[in-house]
Amino acid sequence: MTATAAMDARRTAPGPSGHLLIGQLPELRRDSFEFLIGLAREHGDVVRFRVGPVIVHLVTDPGGVQHVLQDNNRNYGKQTRGFQKLRLVLGQGLLTSEGDFWRRQRRIAQPGFHKDKIRRFADQMTRATERMLQRWTAREPGGAPIDVAHEMMLLTLNIVGETLLSLDTTEESERVGAAVTLTLEHIQRRMFAMFPVVDDLPLEHLNPPMRARPEPLRMR
């Protein structure tokens, strides 16, 4: 996607009309996962829709994603409500910062992600994944559904613990995973709140919970 194509997409990208005042906010809050997938299926690689007064563009084409995140990233800043809410939890890290501050952090972190070090982590990542699959296989037939999102959270925490901290976090993963999931859902509610919420005030009752992920998948 070229810069010209991106500008054209901003003006002409297809998308749903939505509600006059609040756009697609109800659909997004009801089931964000299914809503976004449905937009891509119905309208294509670049979709334009509204969340209240905010214009949003959903980009799912790999070339478009590369254009936004890599080739022309300076044109897409992080001074948005979404990144503002993420900073409440993540601070000014690589994900949420930009500009000179981001470049300094990237230089500091880069040695830890050299390809040779990542290659050495591969065995640990593979073993953690195999343990998860063995646990799935050992389940009783017809047992409770597996929440794949939850399982991926536990797997990620185990891999991070082993590769970056040299710790076995298996016993703590359930508790930490539940806390991370709750935190992300809290942040997402504030990102898609009907009205901006003052972060220091406990006003969650103004913005009821939204279902942020699909129902657990049943493994047969």
Image (cartoon, rainbow, N blue to C red):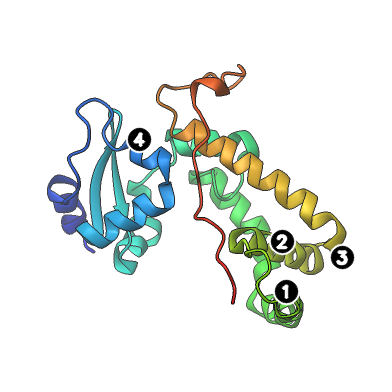
Amino acid type of the residue tagged 1 in the rendering: Met
Q: Could you say where residue 159 lies in the image, as x and y percent from the top left?
A: 74, 68
In this rendering, the label closer to the viewer, 4 or 2: 4
Does residue 105 appear to the left or right of 51 in the view shown? right
Mark identifier at residue 132: 1
Amino acid type of the residue tagged 4 in the rendering: Pro
Instruction: Look at the image and tell me whether residue 143 can be seen.
Output: yes
Q: Are marks 2 and 3 in contact (CB under 8 Å)?
A: no
Q: Are marks 4 and 2 in contact (CB under 8 Å)?
A: no
Distance of label 2 from label 3 (alpha carbons): 12 Å
Q: Callout 1: helix, strand or loop?
A: helix
Distance of label 4 from label 1 (alpha carbons): 36 Å
Q: Could you say where residue 72 lies in the image, as x and y percent from the top left?
A: 33, 56
Q: Label 4: few (<14), some or many (≥20) within 10 Å? A: some
**Quadrant that contains the N terminus:** bottom left
Q: Label 2: few (<14), some or many (≥20) within 10 Å? A: many
Q: Label 1: few (<14), some or many (≥20) within 10 Å? A: some
Looking at the image, residue 133 lies above or below residue 107 = below
What residue does disc 2 label? 154
Amino acid type of the residue tagged 3 in the rendering: Asp
Q: Are marks 4 and 3 in contact (CB under 8 Å)?
A: no
Mark identifier at residue 26: 4
First of labels 4, 2 by sequence position:
4
Residue at x-position 40% and y-position 57%: 69
First of labels 4, 3 by sequence position:
4
Does residue 109 appear to the left or right of 217 in the view shown? right
Q: Callout 2: helix, strand or loop?
A: helix
Instruction: Look at the image and tell me whether residue 90 can be seen.
Output: no
